[in-house]
Image (cartoon, coloured by chain):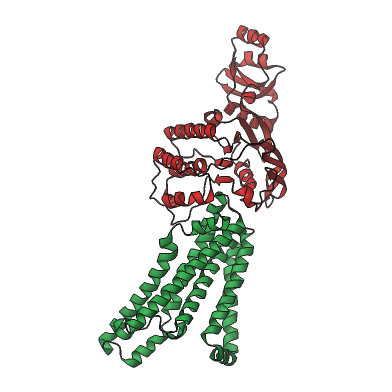
């Protein structure tokens, strides 16, 4: 058996965790959106009137529900699984490649789940109450391909970001992990500042390229974070 | 299939250094371990036993020197590393993995994985298979590490204090299973231990580490015959030990036990008998303890003579 596949199998040892939990999290996000709609319906009536329904198109639950869990999952995978894979005779490279394949699989399944939930949302006219969880602006307003791509790259970014923290911890210890987190925080704040400063150009850029531009930027970040994680993993020790 | 042991197979270490900052853990260590034997790695806490095994297995990086396993550098060498199994004494497991899920994935890592042996060991050690691995008790973790190590049939199996937390019955099971499996599938086993006398029957060769250096590497039987203990009234024993290489002594009231390097001659027996001194074989534990003390003090102090 290919040695990278061994680490992939290790990653998939608990499928309920690496595949099931992301799907359940997305489903729970739908449930929360429906519950909020039901509560609002007490005042505005059900199904929700058109203007309230349109407000739900700004629902960011599909973007914010997963990253926290996926970051911790990525960190745990490269930390604990790394120690296990090494104990079982794996190389660092094969461990990282196998685990990265696992991240790809989790991201793929999560993206497919998002598309399925989007389809159900469309079929049920907003879960029978005209609410929106996936048919939202941030996910391409019902475009299946955009919803798939956005969920895939966001999931991958979260997992590899967790992996980066996990590998930096293994390679350099807790202090440098804290420094890395702090530095990344500064980078994010810096990017936001540049975005605000150049907001006219940014808005024009997004208007021209739309959600695909965001997908491309996130995908580039995935590549950069994955490369950094791979490099750190080469120096990681038990 | 268990790899064939050849004349050239084994572990060769030359001038191995490992330091953490200013702390030297391994200091220019030379070691040759021919394949197909059981080695006992002993020494006080902090001697460098786990670091040595970790460095051989590429779990940590050497600061200097060379390591060859079957003639190849094991660093990021999949062909070499996949023939190794080293479960650390404090082995971390993924928080959500159960014992069963880990055992299920093991055949992917080890083509010679013996599922029947794993199943038997799990039953004999009463390891709860549905429990999460990180939730196992100290003894259960040790037993689980033994299950993986033995069932892996890895050509190079490293056991890190494998008996920790095991009760005497479980330790007996471990010794019995190790000897049975080793007899059927010879391979290289390197085991760090503090229970020296208890594990002595398993070891073919003992390697004593002290402050990052090897102070003894010898066949276990040869080591035990390299010294003896003279026990009797203190003054009589001191007189008997005069001019001999005394490497340790212990006093209990008026009774003195002196560990003396060398072999007992018929003349020694007569002299000891005349002075009511008993000459006894040294235990491996006492010999190693004596060597540790000997290294530190190098000799008995004048007032103790």
Left or right: residue B140 versus residue B86 is left
Rendered location of residue A42, percent (x, y): 25, 85
The answer to whether residue B45 is left or right of residue A24 is right
> Taking B49 as reference, is A55 above or below it?
below
Answer above or below: position of B153 versus A105: above
Q: Which quarter of the image is occupied by the N terminus of chain B?
A: top right
Chain coloured green here? A
Q: Residue at x 45, y 68 (%)?
A: A69
Give coordinates of residue A216: x percent, y percent: 57, 80
- Residue A13 position, x and y percent, is 45, 57
Q: Is residue B211 above or below residue A113?
A: above
Q: Nearer the viewer, residue B288 or A67?
A: A67
Task: State whether residue B162 appears in this view.
Answer: yes
Q: Quadrant of residue B222?
A: top right
**Residue at (54%, 64%) from the top-left corner?**
A101
Look at 61% across and 49% down and name the residue there: B81
The chain whose colour is red is B
């Amino acid at each position: 058996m290919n040695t990278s596949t061994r680490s992939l199998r290790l990653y998939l040892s608990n499928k309920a965790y690496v595949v099931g939990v992301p799907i359940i999290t997305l489903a729970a996000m739908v449930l929360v959106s429906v519950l909020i709609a039901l509560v609002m319906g007490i005042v505005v009536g059900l199904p929700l009137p058109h203007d309230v329904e349109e407000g739900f198109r700004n629902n960011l639950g599909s973007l914010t529900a997963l990253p926290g869990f996926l970051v911790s999952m990525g960190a745990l995978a490269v930390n604990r699984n790394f120690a296990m894979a090494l104990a079982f005779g794996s190389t660092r490279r094969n461990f990282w490649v196998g685990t990265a394949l696992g991240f790809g699989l989790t991201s793929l399944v999560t993206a497919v789940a998002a598309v399925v939930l989007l389809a159900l949302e469309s079929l049920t006219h907003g879960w029978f109450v005209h609410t929106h969880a996936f048919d939202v602006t941030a996910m391409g307003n019902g475009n299946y391909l955009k919803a798939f791509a956005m969920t895939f790259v966001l999931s991958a970014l979260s997992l590899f970001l967790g992996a980066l923290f996990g590998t930096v911890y293994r390679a350099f210890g807790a202090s440098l992990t804290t420094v890395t987190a702090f530095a990344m925080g500064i980078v994010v704040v810096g990017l936001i500042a540049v975005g605000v400063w150049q907001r006219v150009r940014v808005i024009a850029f997004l208007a021209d390229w739309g959600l695909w531009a965001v997908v491309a930027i996130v995908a580039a970040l995935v590549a950069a974070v994955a490369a950094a994680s791979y490099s750190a993993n080469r120096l990681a020790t038990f | 299939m268990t790899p064939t042991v050849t004349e050239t197979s084994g572990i060769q270490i030359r001038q191995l250094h490992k330091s953490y900052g200013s702390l030297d853990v391994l200091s220019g260590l030379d070691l040759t371990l021919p394949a197909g034997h059981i080695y006992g790695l002993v020494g006080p806490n902090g001697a460098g036993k786990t670091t040595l095994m970790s460095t051989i297995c590429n779990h940590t990086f050497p600061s200097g020197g060379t390591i060859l396993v079957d003639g190849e550098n094991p660093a990021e060498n999949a062909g070499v590393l996949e023939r190794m199994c080293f479960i650390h004494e404090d082995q971390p497991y993924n928080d959500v993995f159960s014992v069963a899920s880990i055992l299920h994935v093991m055949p992917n890592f080890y083509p010679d994985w013996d599922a029947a042996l794993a199943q038997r060991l799990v039953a004999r050690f009463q390891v709860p298979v549905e429990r999460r691995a990180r939730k196992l008790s100290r003894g259960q973790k040790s037993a689980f590490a033994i299950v993986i190590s033995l069932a892996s049939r890895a050509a190079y199996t490293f056991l890190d204090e494998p008996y920790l937390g095991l009760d005497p019955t479980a330790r007996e099971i471990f010794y019995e299973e190790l000897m049975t499996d080793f007899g059927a599938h010879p391979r290289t086993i390197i085991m760090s231990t503090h229970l020296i006398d208890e594990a002595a029957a398993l070891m073919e060769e003992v390697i004593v580490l002290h402050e990052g250096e090897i102070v003894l590497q010898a066949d276990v039987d040869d080591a035990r015959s390299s010294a003896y203990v003279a026990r009797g009234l203190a003054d009589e024993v001191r007189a008997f030990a005069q001019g001999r290489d005394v490497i340790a002594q212990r006093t209990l009231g008026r009774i003195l036990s002196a560990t003396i390097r060398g072999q007992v001659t018929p003349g020694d027996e007569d002299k000891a008998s005349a002075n009511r001194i008993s000459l006894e074989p040294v235990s491996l534990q006492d010999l190693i303890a004596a060597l540790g003390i000997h290294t530190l003090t190098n000799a008995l102090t004048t007032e103790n003579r």
